[in-house]
Amino acid sequence: MADEVQSILVIDDHPLMRKGILQLIAMAPDLRLAGEAGDGVSGLKMACQLLPDLILLDLNMHGLSGMDTLKALKAADLDARVIILTISDSEEDVVEALRLGADGYLLKDMEPEDVLHALQVAASGQIALSERVASILAAALRHENQAKSPVSIKLTEREQAILSLIATGYSNKLIARKLKITEGTVKVHVKHLLRKLDLSSRVEAAVWAIKNQDFSKGHFEG
Amino acid sequence: MADEVQSILVIDDHPLMRKGILQLIAMAPDLRLAGEAGDGVSGLKMACQLLPDLILLDLNMHGLSGMDTLKALKAADLDARVIILTISDSEEDVVEALRLGADGYLLKDMEPEDVLHALQVAASGQIALSERVASILAAALRHENQAKSPVSIKLTEREQAILSLIATGYSNKLIARKLKITEGTVKVHVKHLLRKLDLSSRVEAAVWAIKNQDFSKGHFEG
DNA sequence: TTAAGGTTATCTCTACAGGGGTACTTCCCT
DNA sequence: AGGGAAGTACCCCTGTAGAGATAACCTTAA
C-alpha cells in the first residue's frame, strides 16, 4: 500500500518551513509533491483539485486556523490522509486534532528521517504519532479519568460568557449592563457556574478561568 | 561592508526549519554557512569556535531558551550580529530581545527573499526588523508612556504577599488566618494595594496579578 | 406530548468587601 | 530627636456577593 509513490500536499504558512519540507520530500523516492499552500483556504482548494494521498497540515496558521482547515478537509470527504505537522505539543491540540480525525500528529522538532518514516506509516493506513505526542496522548487519557479535564466541565454558553467577564474583573452589575440582563440573573448564572466548577467565590472563578480557559484564544503564536 | 561574503551560524531546534534556512543560505551568493546548532548550548560553543559574522537565533528552544542564549552570546562579547528568527510576534518577546541587544528580529512567516534582504541589512550594521515587528514595536513604545509599566509599581512586601494570596482566590478571612493577623488589617492592605494599582476590586487585583506577575515563567511553547 | 435543561426574573437574608477615618508601634533615615 | 514609611488594629458605613427558593418562558430531546 505504501509501496507506491504517494502524492502529498503541504499546507503551512511559514515559507521557510515549507522550503525545508519540500526539500525533504524531494529526497524521498516514495513521495511526490502534489502542491503547496500558504494558508488554509487555498490549501482546501488545492486538496479538492489535486486529490493528494497525503496532506501535511500546520496548525498555527493565520486566517483559517489549522483546526478549522482540518475540519473542512474532513468534511469534504476526501480520501486524503491528513497529518498534522506543528510545533504545538499541547495536550489540547493533540486531543482536538485526533478527535477531528487527523491521521497523524507530528512535531516540527522531529528529525527529518523520522518525519519521512511517519509519513510512510500514515500512508499505510496507520495513525502516525511522534514519540513525544504518543506520551502526551497517554497522559491525556490518564487525566481524563481522574481530574475533571477542563473540557469535560460543561458550562452553558451564558455561563461561559459570564465567567470570562468575571475573569476580566467585572462586577455582577457591570456584567448585567454589558449583557443587558438584570443583576439578579447574573447572580443566578454565577451561582450555577460556581457550583459546577466546585468553587466558592468569583475570585476563584477568575483565577480558574485564566488558568484553564485559554484554549479559546489562539494556539499561541500570533 | 555587506558586500563581502558573510558567514552565518544557524541556531534553531527545529530540523525542518533549519533545512529551509540552510537551503535559503545556499542560494544566497553573499552568505556562507558557518554552522548549524539544534540547541542553545551547542550554538554558544559553535559561536565561540567559528566566530561567525551573523547568528540566526530561534527564540523558542528547549533547554537553554533563545533569550538565555541571546544573553550568553552578548555576554561573550563576540563580534557576531545576532538576528532573532522566530514565530513569536508577542510584544514582550520583541522588546525583551531588542533590550538584550539583538541586532534584528524576524518572523518565520516572512517571505524567504525578505529574510535574505533583512540579513543583508543586519550585516551592514543596521537593525533588521520585519514590517510586522516594526509596527509591534511602535505600539509597544506607545504603551510604555501611558500604562504604568508593571515594574514601576511599588507594592510593599506585605501587600505583595496579600496580592498573591488574593490571586489564588483567598478571602480576607483566610488571608488573615494564613498570615496570623486580623481580617481588618488584611482589609487595610487590600485597600492600599487596590489604590496603588488603580483597581477597584479584589477580582481585578487577582487578574492583574496573574497577568503581570508571571514574567518568571517561560516563553510559551512546550 | 411530556420531560429536561437553559435563560430570564423575582424575592429574602447573611456574609463579605471595600471606602473613610484614627491610632499605636517599629524601624530607618537624616 | 524628629519625620516618614510600614505594619498592625480598631471604628463606622455602604455596597456587593452569594445561597436559598420560586417561577415564567423557550427549545430540544425522549
Image: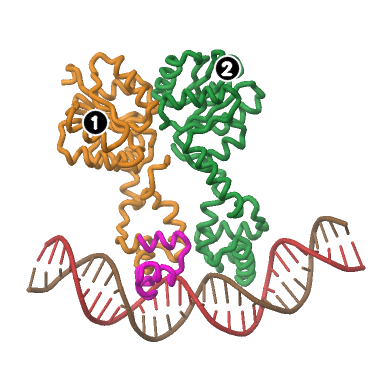
Chain colours: A orange, B green, C brown, D red
**Residue displayed at 44% across by 54% down:** A210
Q: Residues within 10 Å of mark 1 (few under 14, many from 20)?
A: some
Give the letter of the chain under mark 1. A
- Residue B53 percent coordinates (x, y): 58, 18
Which residue position holds label 1? Answer: A127
Whether pointer 1 and pointer 2 mark residues with C-beta atoms closer than 8 Å, the reply is no
Lateral position of residue A220 relative to residue A126, left or right: right
Q: Does the rendering let one see residue A141?
A: yes
**Residue displayed at 23% across by 42% down:** A71
What secondary structure is found at the residue carrying circle 1? loop
Q: From the viewer's perspective, is residue A15 above or below residue C20?
A: above
Q: Nearer the viewer, residue A163 or D8?
A: A163
- Residue B108 percent coordinates (x, y): 43, 31
Lateral position of residue B157 relative to residue B37, left or right: right
Please state, as top left, top right, bottom left or bottom right, where the C terminus of chain A lies in the image: top left
**Residue displayed at 38% across by 48% down:** A217
Label 1 – label 2 distance at C-alpha: 42 Å
Give the letter of the chain under mark 2. B
Which residue position holds label 2? Answer: B52
Q: From the viewer's perspective, is residue A219 above or below residue A164?
A: above
Snapshot quadrant of residue A193? bottom left
Q: Give the amino acid at mark 1.
A: Ile
Snapshot quadrant of residue B209? bottom right
